[in-house]
Image (tube, grey):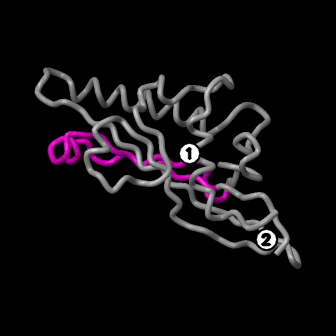
């Protein structure tokens, strides 16, 4: 197998867009956009979106001539809201939490498959680094400034080993 580190972000986006496998369909769960990479166009974020990024790559070399790249996958999640309606901020925060819950189910994967359908050696399986971390931005700031809720989801993926 050739070095495929350049395809990791797209492979993870493809997994998050998978449907019909018994896990939540993220688009049906309220996410309007699930894609690889952050769009350059600010208007692209007018729908609730999950943007897959890779923040870190360790090119692990466990044995002679063997490589096992490890990535920190970062999901930038954005949930636009329409302010002005009574109690809308509270309702949208709950909707955002529910949608992130569906996202976590998809990241965890089905019982017995931690490879995201064979796309990786393992995903969200590194106890010493935490399996999955979600950090919510302060809604007081994001609702006022950008009329949206935001969070960052991070986890690690080990790629399939290859000979170099």
Q: Is residue 18 depicted above or below 58 in this figure?
A: above
Residue drawn at x 66%, y 58% as measured from the top left: 128
Q: Does the stretch in magenta take in 68?
A: no
- Pick whichever, 50 or 44, lies toward us: 44
Residue drawn at x 31%, y 31% as measured from the top left: 93
In the picture, measured across the screen, residue 50 lies left or right of residue 13, that is left
Q: Residue furthest left?
A: 84
Disc 2: CA contacts within 10 A as few (<14), some (14-19) or many (>=20): some
Residue drawn at x 64%, y 38% as measured from the top left: 108
Q: Does the stretch in magenta take in 129?
A: yes
Tag 1–tag 2 contact (CB < 8 Å): no
Q: Is residue 142 depicted above or below 70 in this figure?
A: above
Q: Residue furthest right?
A: 64
- Pick whichever, 88 or 46, lies toward us: 46
**Label disc, if present, on residue 69 of the rendered structure:** none
Q: Quadrant of the N terminus?
A: bottom right
In the picture, measured across the screen, residue 123 lies left or right of residue 76, that is right
**Residue to which mark 1 is pinned:** 13
How far from the left and from the top, in percent, is residue 73?
A: 56, 55
How far from the left and from the top, in percent, is residue 164?
A: 82, 75
**Residue to which mark 2 is pinned:** 67
In the picture, measured across the screen, residue 149 lies left or right of residue 69, that is left
Q: Secondary structure at mark 1?
A: helix
Asked which quadrant contains residue 126, the reply is: bottom right
Please report whichever mark, 1 or 2, sits nearer to the chain's N-terminal start: 1
Which segment is the magenta one?
128-156
Residue drawn at x 67%, y 22% as measured from the top left: 22
Q: CA distance from mark 1 to mark 2?
A: 23 Å
How far from the left and from the top, in percent, is residue 49?
A: 39, 40
Q: Secondary structure at mark 2?
A: strand
How far from the left and from the top, in percent, is residue 122?
A: 74, 50
- Pick whichever, 117 or 134, lies toward us: 117
């Amino acid at each position: 197998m050739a070095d495929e580190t350049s395809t990791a972000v797209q492979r993870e986006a493809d997994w998050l867009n998978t449907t019909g496998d018994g896990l939540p369909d993220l688009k049906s769960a309220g996410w309007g956009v699930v894609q690889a990479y952050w769009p350059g166009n600010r208007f692209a974020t007018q729908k609730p979106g999950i943007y897959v990024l890779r923040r870190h790559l360790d090119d692990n070399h466990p044995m002679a001539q063997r490589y096992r790249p490890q990535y920190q996958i970062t999901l930038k999640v954005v949930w636009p809201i329409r302010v002005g309606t009574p109690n809308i901020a509270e309702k949208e925060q709950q909707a955002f939490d529910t949608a992130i819950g569906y996202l976590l189910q998809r990241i965890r994967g089905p019982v017995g498959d931690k490879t995201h359908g064979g796309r990786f050696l393992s995903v969200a399986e590194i106890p010493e680094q935490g399996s999955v971390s979600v950090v919510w931005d302060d809604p007081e700031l994001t609702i006022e400034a950008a009329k949206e809720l935001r969070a960052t989801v991070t986890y690690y993926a080990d790629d399939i080993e290859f000979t170099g």
